[in-house]
Image (cartoon, rainbow, N blue to C red):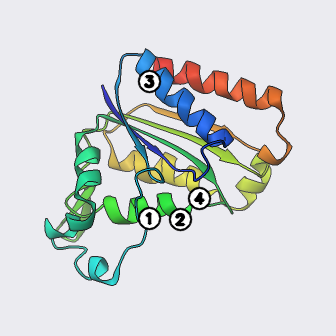
């Protein structure tokens, strides 16, 4: 299966970088073809420009600045997102990826004023995230990233597609043991993905 891994963290020595490495290694060990999209390393610009917003619904010219990323998303049979959650939201880089790449004609189309999903070719979804806060604080804040993964993204892909959602909460008080256990869990889940 062709898996698009969308990784978002600016520091190559971060715990998220270690998670990313385990995700890619696990998927590769399972025999998947991995398209590893490191947004920072690739120099992705998260800024939706005025011109892009004005042409947002102009298919196919709306893809002009992000054509290669659109093609990669369209070629994927599975999607795995690896990212921290900062201030109970996605990092700006990942939010910008969704804003600029999940376009009309790519991830959805408008039919009689209604959104029709176009990512039905994605048959599996994964998200591996870290939070500085405890799960209770994230819950009290509404936990938008969790809802986006479990509701918004899931609604755009193949119906009833399996979801692997792994979260390391409370990073502010994590230990070598909790981080090691989480990395082992990530590797095991990706080897089964």
Q: CA distance from mark 4 to mark 3?
A: 27 Å
Between the residue at mark 2 and the residue at mark 3, the CA separation in whole angstroms equals 26 Å
Does the CB distance between marks 1 and 4 fall below 8 Å?
no
The secondary element bearing badge 1 is classed as helix
Name the spot of residue 142 as percent of width and height, x first.
66, 60
Chain-order first, disc 4 or disc 3 = 3
The disc at residue 144 is 4
Q: Is residue 94 left or right of residue 61?
A: right
Query: Which residue is tagged 2?
Result: 92
Q: Residue under circle 1?
A: 96
Q: Is residue 110 left or right of residue 189?
A: left
Q: Residues within 10 Å of mark 2 (few under 14, many from 20)?
A: some
Whether 145 is drawn above or below 113: the answer is above
Q: Tally the marks.
A: 4
User: Which mark identifies residue 27?
Assistant: 3
Name which residue lies at 79% across and 30% down.
178
Q: Secondary structure at mark 4?
A: helix
Q: Kindly report which numbered mark, 1 or 4, lies closer to the viewer in this rendering.
A: 1
CA–CA distance in space, label 4 to label 2: 14 Å
Q: Is residue 141 visible?
A: yes
Contact check, label 2 and label 1, Cβ < 8 Å: yes
Location of residue 170 with respect to 29 vertically, above or below: below
Above-or-below relation of 47 to 163: below
Q: Are marks 3 and 1 in contact (CB under 8 Å)?
A: no
């Amino acid at each position: 299966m062709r898996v698009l891994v969308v990784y978002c963290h600016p520091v190559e020595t971060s715990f998220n970088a270690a998670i990313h490495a385990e995700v890619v290694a696990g998927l590769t060990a399972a025999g998947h073809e991995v398209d590893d999209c490191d947004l920072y390393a690739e120099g992705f610009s998260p800024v939706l420009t005025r011109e892009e917003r004005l042409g947002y619904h102009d298919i196919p010219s709306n893809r002009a600045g992000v054509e290669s990323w659109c093609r990669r998303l369209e070629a994927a049979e599975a999607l795995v997102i690896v990212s921290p959650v900062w201030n109970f939201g996605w990092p700006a880089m990942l939010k910008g990826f969704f804003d600029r790449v999940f376009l009309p004609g790519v991830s959805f189309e408008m039919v009689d004023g209604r959104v029709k999903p176009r990512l039905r070719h994605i048959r599996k979804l994964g998200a591996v995230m870290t939070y500085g806060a405890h799960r209770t604080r994230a819950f009290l804040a509404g936990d938008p990233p969790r809802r986006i993964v479990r509701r918004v993204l899931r609604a755009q892909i193949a119906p009833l597609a399996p979801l692997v959602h792994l979260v390391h909460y409370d990073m502010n008080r994590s230990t070598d043991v909790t981080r090691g256990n989480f990395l082992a869990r990530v590797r095991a889940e990706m080897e089964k993905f």
